[in-house]
Image (cartoon, coloured by chain):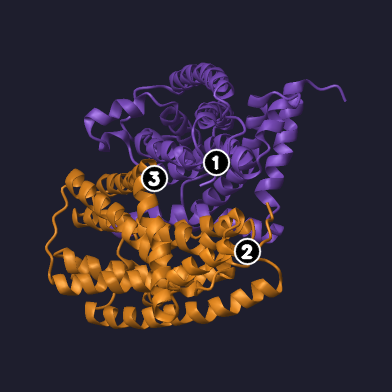
Chain colours: A purple, B orange
Amino acid sequence: MNRSQSLRSFTMATWLGWQIESNWADPFLFAVYSIIKPLAGAAILVVMYGIITEGNFENPLFPYIYLGNAFYIYVGAVMAGVSWAVIDDREHYRTLKYIYVAPINFPAYLMGRGVARFLTGTFSVIITLAAGAWFLHMPLNLAEVDWPLFLLSLCIGIVMLAMMGLILASITLMVAHHFSLIGEAVAGALYLFSGAIFPLEVLPAWLRPVGYAMPITYWLELLRRSLVGDVAQAFPTLARFSNAELLGILLGLSLVFGLLAVVTYRWCDRLARERGLIDRTTNY
Amino acid sequence: MSSQSGVGSRESAVKKATGGRLFLKTIIARAYPRVVGQQREKSWLFFDVFLPMLAVAAYVFVYRAIGAPEEYVGFVVVGGAMTAFWMNVLWGMSSQLYWEKESGNLALYIMAPNSMMAVLLGMAIGGMTATLLRAAAIILLGSLLFNVQYVVVSLPALLAVFLLAMTALYGMGMMTASLFLLLGREAWHFANLAQEPVYLVSGFYFPIKSFNFWAAAAASLIPMTLGLDAMRQLVFPSGFKLGFLDVQTEIIILVALCVAFLGGAKALLAYMEKLAIREGRLTESRR
């Protein structure tokens, strides 16, 4: 089979990542594991919302919160999936040096390692959306979904998240094991600033520009608009933008982050090699 | 010959600890790296405070977006601070013996002439002390950022509830640590799995009274549930209205949980240690 080095690295890393993610348990236990965590996260927000509004799930704010939270699963999954591979291979399996000397494309390998988390994340997103539609009467009508907008936004967003993951992975090459929480910290910060579970207007005015500078803000808005249309447009945050404008902003910011990822990777990779960090084990 | 006698005299000069003194020294020895190590690595301090603060801020803004009364903001801040303890119990207690196995220390613990119960107690006391600083930082930051007002009804009752909740919680951690003796790679996933569901059922971000009685009663088996509920009743003016049970009842249940979990930890640890030795799992490394 004559495949390019990048594609071969990507597909093999995908297979490897899937094995690492899933083969610690039997399929049933793994499925339960994949369902419980995201549903519990969503249920916290549902209970909070239900207590205060006395179960008024008809309010447009509910689908705003619920959908934002559901799709945010991808942010943690893809970003952490790509960046965690560095720690996993360097510190746990101690194979990073062998991977470096093997004839593979390392960024493509890292992306492939993130695919497994993307797949489990997709499973979690689907389960969370289905639970919302079945049990909480979220206005999600599959016949009315703007599928082209949804799929296009989803694809651009996943590539954008992978690029952000590559930035984190590059930084992770330079830092010790105990900084592994960097992925969670970034995902947690973006959860706060990207309007995932509340409109940006709720943030103090001086914090809102951070949200406007993040592509995730526009990505989540596009996903909401494609799935529940008018409900999502009921909030003033990005109401002045059309779908095409939002797509343009998302694409532009994704390109910026892509460029940043390439530059960061090259810089960190060179420094890590120079300082002999590729095969170190910090081990605590 | 002379060197042998030198070694012998040095050995006799060091008074060997046995019995209660060995137990106490083991606790201190295991607690020491917990306290010192966690303060020495500044990045952990940052992440342990920063990450829960992000969750606290996110949930505070959700409450503000849906127009919740301001006391709910206080509930979130207190709950967010308590997440530091739950995280410590999960990652620093329950799964600790798995990490020790991975790094090769577990066999040394078992071989050494000390009690494993003392090792676990040392881990618990050290972890609790180190985490207390982080929880205090989260309370302080959260209260300042979101202007939370506290009205402490009874300081002795508040201290009693906190200490009982911590004793029962870390007792539970010690008990689950012995279960993790048998686990391999899946330990990480199980600990990871136990985060959000416990945040949900223990009411870290909302009053547990919102559940129906039996659901809340079942959730009360996790000591943090009643501990949080009682603490909120004791520090917020409207806490009593939103409390699950009255504080006295919750204190009595917490005492029972302390006894049950510490006793359970001792019995289970003895059993699991034997089982792990018999099945050869103390030194295995299933990566």
How packed is label 3: few (under 14 Cα within 10 Å), some, or many (20 or more)?
some
In the image, is A189 to the left or to the right of A201? right
**Tag shown at residue B183:** 2
* Amino acid type shown at disc 3: Trp
Q: How many marks?
A: 3
Rendered image quadrant of residue A4: top right
| A125 and A62: which is toward the camera | A125
How packed is label 1: few (under 14 Cα within 10 Å), some, or many (20 or more)?
many
| B255 and B205: which is toward the camera | B255
- Cβ–Cβ below 8 Å for labels 3 and 2? no
Tell me: residue A255, above or below residue A224.
above
x then y, percent, for residue B40: 36, 46
Nearest-to-viewer mark from 1 and 2: 2
Tell me: residue A187, above or below residue A49.
above
Q: Chain of mark 2?
A: B
x then y, percent, for residue B90: 46, 60
* Amino acid type shown at disc 2: Leu
Separation (CA) of disc 3 from disc 2: 26 Å
| Residue at x 32%, y 47% (from the top left corner) | B49
| B117 and A109: which is toward the camera | B117
Is label 3 on the same chain as label 1? no
Please name the residue that numbered disc 1 is placed on. A77
* Amino acid type shown at disc 1: Ala
Separation (CA) of disc 1 from disc 2: 25 Å
Q: Secondary structure at mark 2?
A: loop
Please name the residue that numbered disc 3 is placed on. B44
Q: Chain of mark 1?
A: A
